[in-house]
Image: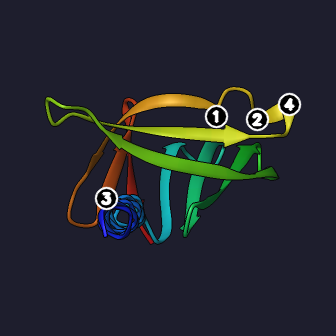
Amino acid sequence: MKTLKRVLALALAVVMVFALVSCSKKLSGTYSAEIGGSIAGSKTSYTFSGSKVTVSVTGTLLGGSNTKSYEGEYEIIEAEDGTMSIKFTFENAEAKEYTGTFAFSEGEDSIKIGLFTYNKQ
């Protein structure tokens, strides 16, 4: 009988852990920010779906533009003091400047990653 109680307690603990993990904060949709203008500037967009993220960067110079996109994963982390950060993992070596952990906050129709605010599209 003690063995059955232990097995049930362990099963309950496992279910609770999975419930907490599945409740982690997720984003959905595309958020963009633009720097500069139509002559020389850039637009960066993050598209979130589940735990996946695609970052697209479009550079504009004298009317021409070039877009690069990178696919990876993200995780939102909340510290004990309530501050939040976002961790990006990209396999592509060209995306190294986007890989890492950055300060994060969420507004009504925007998110802030590091120093930049991205508006929901």
> In front of the other: label 2 or label 3?
2
- Separation (CA) of disc 4 from disc 3: 28 Å
- In the rendered image, the quadrant that contains the N terminus is bottom left
Where residue 57 appears, as percent x and y from the top left, is 69, 48
Where residue 116 appears, as percent x and y from the top left, is 40, 37
| Residue for badge 2 | 95
- Separation (CA) of disc 1 from disc 2: 5 Å
Q: How many C-alpha atoms fall within 10 Å of the one at disc 1: few (<14), some, or many (≥20)?
A: some
Q: Amino acid at mark 4?
A: Ala
Q: Amino acid at mark 3?
A: Ser
- Separation (CA) of disc 1 from disc 3: 19 Å
Indicate how the structure is coloured in the image. rainbow
Q: Amino acid at mark 1?
A: Tyr
| Residue for badge 1 | 98
Tell whether label 2 touches label 4 (CB within 8 Å).
yes
- Separation (CA) of disc 4 from disc 2: 5 Å
Instruction: Point out the tag, 4 or 3, that comes first from the N-terminus.
Output: 4
- Separation (CA) of disc 1 from disc 4: 10 Å
Residue lying at 66% horizontally and 40% vertically, measured from the top left: 89
> In front of the other: label 4 or label 3?
4
- In the rendered image, the quadrant that contains the C terminus is bottom left
Instruction: Point out the tag, 1 or 3, that comes first from the N-terminus.
Output: 1
Q: Amino acid at mark 2?
A: Ala
| Residue for badge 4 | 93
Foreground residue among 91 and 65: 91
